[in-house]
Image (tube, rainbow, N blue to C red):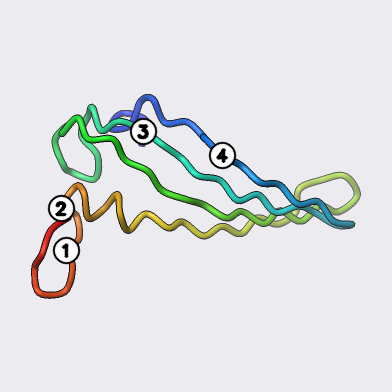
Amino acid sequence: FYVGLPDLKPVRQEVMVEDEGLMAMTRWEATHTGVFFGVPATGKALHFSTADRYRLQDGLLVEHWDVVDAQEAWLALGIVVRPGGARA
């Protein structure tokens, strides 16, 4: 992951805490400067978002769920195409 996106960084994060855990919603940005999912470096600025849910028990992390929304990044790299074959 870091080979293709070595400057990957969170640029906005919202964290919500509750009794047994927390949820973090994060927007990530990076520059595609190395091979990523088989795609040679393009120099394109990419972004994607994640939502992570952590559950704690007795002070320990016991569960982690995440959702990644990377559709725009995949479109920009040509990993996926829009219906009809249109690229971003």
Residue 50 shows which numbered tag? Answer: none
- The residue wearing badge 2 is 78
Q: Residue at x 57, y 55 (%)?
A: 51
Vertical placement of residue 67 versus 39, above or below: below
- Three-letter amino acid code at disc 4? Arg
Residue 12 shows which numbered tag? Answer: 4
Which structural element holds mark 2?
Answer: loop
Q: Quadrant of the C terminus?
A: bottom left
Which structural element holds mark 3?
Answer: strand
- The residue wearing badge 1 is 81
Q: CA distance from mark 1 to mark 3?
A: 21 Å
| Mark closest to the chain's N terminus, 2 or 3 | 3
Residue 60 horizontal side relative to residue 8, left or right: right
How packed mark 1 is, by other alpha carbons closer than 10 Å (few <14, some 14-19, many 20 or more), is some
Image coordinates of residue 67 in percent, x first then y, are 51, 60
Q: CA distance from mark 3 to mark 4?
A: 13 Å
How packed mark 4 is, by other alpha carbons closer than 10 Å (few <14, some 14-19, many 20 or more), is few
- Three-letter amino acid code at disc 3? Ala
Image coordinates of residue 55 in percent, x first then y, are 76, 56
Q: Residue at x 24, y 45 (%)?
A: 37
Q: CA distance from mark 2 to mark 4?
A: 26 Å
- The residue wearing badge 3 is 30
Instruction: Give yes or no for contact between labels 1 and 2 (Cβ–Cβ under 8 Å).
Output: yes
